[in-house]
């Protein structure tokens, strides 16, 4: 009986210490988000804002460095998390990138991977005090074009062709929300329309296991389980836009197949 | 260009380029045909080519509120009239 009690106590103690580690890692990441920005990056953002011509580019690069450091912190503080990123991903340029969506970490991971990146962000984030300003200055697109967002959307779409031609990438999570069961949900067609409009290749990326580290609905990172986060190129679609322009349905079907669903 | 001629061109574009099936003049573009803001911007580009001039940013912003094909025709008619004044 006493042995069982002791075993229970040891189990509870182990669980408590593990939860403390999760809490600590999450806290360290939040400290980076707040103080890393305030103490280090805010000055660079401020300087970038002064450049009228290349503000977007400088903001995108700063975002990329900021989140790259964030993932370095995650790797150091949570050594059981392994990250395997296909080396060819860093070479992607001038493309529309579509990706499955499992966790809030996914957009941060893609921002960290691409120095020149734009994406579509939920409109409400544009109204946030500091974050809203950064995503606006970075040239990210609002998900909605209603009311005040119409001008922003038009401005971004007017310059999208030049941006993509200059080597920039546009990454989009066509499901629009995180998948709770790993299955691919209904795909919004915006990414395919933009790719077709500007005659750009579509890269299909597959992200795995970010949800195991930062599970939807949970506040703390789950750093205790051994986990391999991976990003791979599932397909590269280069349609013959001039001679055989694909239908949006064709593109959707191919992306869905690449993401592992028929 | 008359309203009817313009209507025929718009209908042809919506069928050929936007893959609409049997579009009606009073159909809700978004609900009935999945026409979104990206489509609206692409369509504006095609209308600019037909009309031979570019829309201002304010004119484009107004177009984002368009809901039906008849709205498109009214919108273009109003712009053409304001330009000829």
Image (cartoon, coloured by chain):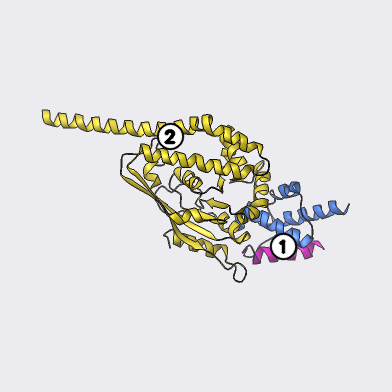
Chain colours: A yellow, B blue
The percent coordinates of residue A95 (x first, y second) are 56, 57
Range drawn in magenta = B1-23
The quarter in which the N terminus of chain A is drawn is top left
Picture residue at 53% right of the left edge, 41% below the top: A63
Is residue B6 in view?
Answer: yes
The quarter in which the C terminus of chain A is drawn is bottom left
Magenta segment main secondary structure: helix
Q: Which mark is residue A39?
A: none
Left-right relation of B82 to A17 = right
SS for dot 1: helix
Magenta region includes residue A135 = no
The residue that mark 2 highlights is A29
Magenta region includes residue B15 = yes
Picture residue at 39% right of the left edge, 37% below the top: A218
- Chain for mark 1? B
Quarter of image, res B4? bottom right
The percent coordinates of residue A67 (x first, y second) are 48, 41
SS for dot 2: helix
Picture residue at 45% right of the left edge, 39% below the top: A70
Left-right relation of A60 to A262 = right
Seen from the viewer's position, the closer of residues A191 and A229 is: A229
Is residue A1 in view?
Answer: no
The percent coordinates of residue A12 (x first, y second) are 24, 31
Picture residue at 32% right of the left edge, 33% below the top: A19
Picture mark count: 2
The percent coordinates of residue A164 (x first, y second) are 61, 55
Image height of A35 relative to A105, above or below: above
Seen from the viewer's position, the closer of residues B72 and A138 is: A138
Quarter of image, res A220? top left
Seen from the viewer's position, the closer of residues A1 and A29 is: A29
The residue that mark 1 highlights is B10
């Amino acid at each position: 009986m006493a042995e069982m009690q002791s075993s229970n106590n040891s189990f509870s103690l182990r669980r408590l210490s593990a939860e403390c580690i999760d809490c600590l890692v999450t806290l360290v990441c939040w400290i980076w988000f707040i103080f890393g920005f305030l103490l280090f990056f805010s000055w660079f953002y401020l300087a970038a804002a002064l450049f009228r011509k290349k503000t977007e580019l400088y903001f995108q690069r700063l975002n990329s460095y900021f989140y790259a450091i964030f993932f370095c912190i995650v790797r150091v503080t949570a050594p059981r998390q392994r990250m395997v990123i296909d080396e060819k991903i860093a070479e992607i340029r001038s493309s529309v990138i579509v990706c499955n969506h499992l966790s809030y970490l996914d957009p941060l991971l893609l921002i960290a991977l691409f120095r020149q990146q734009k994406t579509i962000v939920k409109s409400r984030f544009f109204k946030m005090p500091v974050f809203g300003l950064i995503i606006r200055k970075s040239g990210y697109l609002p998900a909605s074009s209603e009311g005040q967002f119409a001008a922003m959307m038009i401005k971004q779409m007017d310059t999208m062709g030049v941006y993509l031609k200059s080597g920039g990438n546009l990454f989009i999570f066509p499901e629009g929300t995180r998948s709770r069961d790993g299955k691919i949900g209904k795909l919004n067609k915006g990414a395919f329309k933009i790719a077709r409009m500007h005659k750009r290749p579509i890269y299909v990326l597959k992200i795995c296991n970010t949800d195991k580290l930062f599970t939807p609905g949970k506040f703390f990172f789950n750093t205790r389980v051994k986990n391999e986060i991976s990003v791979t190129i599932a397909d590269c679609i280069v349609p013959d836009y001039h001679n055989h322009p694909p239908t949006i349905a064709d593109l959707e079907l191919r992306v869905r197949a690449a993401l592992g669903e028929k | 260009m008359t309203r009817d001629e313009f209507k025929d061109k718009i209908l042809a574009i919506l069928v050929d380029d936007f893959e609409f099936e049997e579009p009606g003049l009073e159909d809700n573009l978004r609900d009935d045909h999945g026409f979104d803001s990206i489509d609206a911007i692409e369509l504006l580009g095609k209308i600019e080519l037909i009309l031979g001039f570019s829309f201002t940013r304010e004119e484009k912003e107004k177009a984002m509120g368009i809901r039906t094909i008849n709205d498109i025709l009214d919108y273009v008619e109003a712009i053409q009239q304001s330009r000829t004044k």
